[in-house]
Image: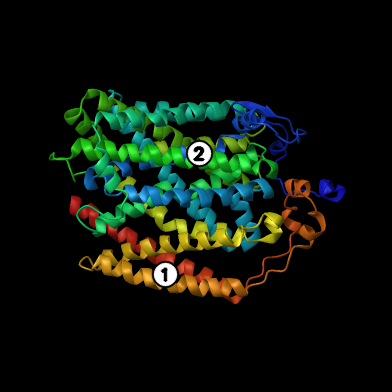
Amino acid sequence: MSNQAAKQPSAVLDQAHIGDIRGAFGTIGVNDTGARTNWRARLVTLLAIMGPGLIVMVGDNDAGGVSTYAQAGQDFGTSLLWVLALLVPVLIVNQEMVVRLGLVSGVGHAKLIFARFGKFWGAFSFGDLMILNLLTIVTEFIGVSLAMQHFGFSPLVAVGLAALLLIGMTVTGSFRRWERFMYVMVIGNFIAIPMAFLSHPKVTPMLHGLIPGVQGGFGSSAILLIIGMVGTTVAPWQLFFQQSNVIDKRLTPRYLSYERLDTVIGSVVVVIGAAAIIACTAFAFRGTALFGQFNDAGTVIAGLTQHVGVLSGDLFAIALLNASLIGAAAVTLSTSYAIGDVFGSRHSLHRTLKDGLSFYAAYAVIILVAAGITVIPGAPLGLITTGVQALAGVLLPSATVFLLLLCNDKEVLGPWVNQVWLNVIAIVIVGVLVMLSLILAATTFFPTVNVTLLAQTLGIILLMGLAVVGLIWSRRRQKPSTRTLTLVTSREDRFTWRMAPLDTLERTTWTPVLKMGMLTLRGYLLVAVVMLAVKIVQLAVGGA
C-alpha cells in the first residue's frame, strides 16, 4: 500500500463508523487486512459481513409487499410472476451501486446528493424520502394491526406493542444486537414457503406465469398493480438504508465482493418469498367467489382460513406481522440515518442511547407518529397500501437517476466508478420505470386506450431515447480525478481508496444536457404524482 494512500483523509462523518466490524455472526478487526486464501476463511468472513444486503432485501417483503403480492395472486393468479423474475437483476444492479457508494465514500446517500447536486436537489430528494418513508411505515403498522386482530388483539394494543418492540430493539447501543434481532425476522420470511404448499400449488401454471402477460389483459388496474409490485420490490428507501447500513457496519472497499454476495443472496431470498405469497393466494382462491376481489390483507387472512384452513390463515397472519416489523425497522432506520447525515448529528447503532440521543430520538418519533396515524378510525387500509407502493414506483426513477450520476462521479468513487456495461443496464432500468409510469398516466385519463399499442409505442420511443442517451454518453469525456491517478497504483491502493472530505472535492459540472435532464425529471415527477393521485381517487370512489 502506498504511504500516500494510507494518509489520505476520508469523508466519514461519524467516528463510530470506524473500527472493528461486529456482525451478527463474527468480528473482523480493523487491522485484519490479510487475504482469505481458503474456503473456510472466506465463509467465516462472509458470515461476519453478511447482513445489510440480506436485511434490506427481506425488509422489502414488508406489509405493503405482502399485501401487493397477495393481491397479485388473488386478482391475477400466477400471471404476474414474470414481474418478479425481471426485478431480480434490477434489485442486484441498484443495490450493488449503493454498496459501492457506501463502502468507498463513507457518507450516506442523502448527504452525497446535497454535496454533489446542491441544496435544491438535496432537499427535493430528502423531502421525497421523508414523505414516502412515513407513509410506508404507516402501512407497516396497518399490517401489524390486521395481523394481530386475527389473534384477538385490538389495533391500539397491537400497534402500541409493536412500536415499543421496534424502539427497544434499536436503542440497545449495539449494532450486533440489532442485527441479530433483524436476523430473527429474516428467518421468519421463510414462513411463506409452507404457507404456499398448503394451497396445493401446481407447477405448470407457475411456469406459465414466468411468460409476460396478464390474466384478463393489460388493463389500468393491472398496470397500477405492476407499478405497485415494482415500487414495493425496488423501493427508494432501500438505496438510503443499505448505503448507510454498510457504513454503520464499518465495511470498506476491501469487503465489496462479500457485500455483493450478501446482496445477491438477499435478492434471491426476497423473490422466493414474494413468489410463495403469490402462489398461496392464486391457488387458494382459484375458482372461488373471492378470486379477483382483493380488499386488504385482513380479508386475505379470513379467506385463507375459510378456503384452505385455520393453519393457513394463522401462517399468513404471522408472515404479515413479521414482514411489518422488519419493514418498519428498516424503513425507519433509513430515515434516521438520512436525518443524521443531512443535519450532521451522530447516527450510529454503535452509540449508546445517551451518546446518540438525537439519532434514537428521531427513530422513536417517526415510529410513534406513524403508529398514531395508523389507529385513526375508518382509514381505507387496502387502498392506502396499494397507493403507497405505486407512489414508490413513480418516485423510483428519480432516486435511480441520482444513484447513476453518483456512481459515475470520479470525485466520489475514483477507481470504483461504473463500468460502461453497468451504465447501459442502469439507463435501461430508468427508462422502463418511466415508461410504466407514463402508461399509468395515460390509462388514468383515457381508460379506453389500447394499452398494448401504447406500451409498444412507448417501447419504440424508449429505444430511440436510449440510443440518443448512448450517443451523448459516448461523447462525454469526464476529466480523470487527479487524486485517483496519483494514489491508485496497486490492488491494495484500490482497496484502501476512500472519498476525500466532501468540502475538498471538485464541484460537479452542470452541463446543459444534465440541466435539461434534471428539469425534465422534475416535470415528469410532478405530472406522474398528480395523475397517480387522480387514479387513487378514482379507485376510492369506485370502491365506495
Q: Secondary structure at mark 1?
A: helix
- The answer to whether residue 47 is above or below residue 482 is above
- Counting from the top left corner in percent of width and height, residue 511 is at 62, 74
Is residue 41 found left or right of 467 in the rendered image? right
Q: Give percent across and percent down for residue 30.
A: 75, 34
- Name the residue: 51% across, 35% down: 364
Q: Give the number of callouts.
A: 2
Q: Nearer the viewer, residue 145 or 91?
A: 91
Q: Amino acid at mark 1?
A: Leu
What amino acid type should be assigned to the residue bearing mark 2? Ile
The kind of secondary structure element at disc 2 is helix
In front here: 32 or 505? 32
Residue 389 seen in the current view: no
The answer to which of marks 2 and 1 sits earlier in the sequence is 2
Question: Which quadrant of the structure image shows residue 300?
Answer: top left
Locate residue 387 relative to residue 289 in the image: left or right.
Answer: right
- Does residue 499 appear in this view? yes
Q: Position of residue 117 (x, y in %)?
A: 62, 62
Q: Nearer the viewer, residue 515 or 310?
A: 310
Front residue of this view, candidates 97 and 63: 97
Dot 1 alpha-carbon crowd within 10 angstroms: few under 14, some 14 to 19, many 20 or more: some
Q: Of discs 2 and 1, which sits in the foreground?
A: 2
Q: Residue at x 67, y 66 (%)?
A: 508
Q: Which mark is residue 203?
A: none
Disc 2 target residue: 265
Distance of label 2 from label 1 (alpha carbons): 31 Å
Q: Residues within 10 Å of mark 2 (few under 14, many from 20)?
A: some
Say if 261 sits above or below 522 in the image: above
Give me the disc on residue 462: 1
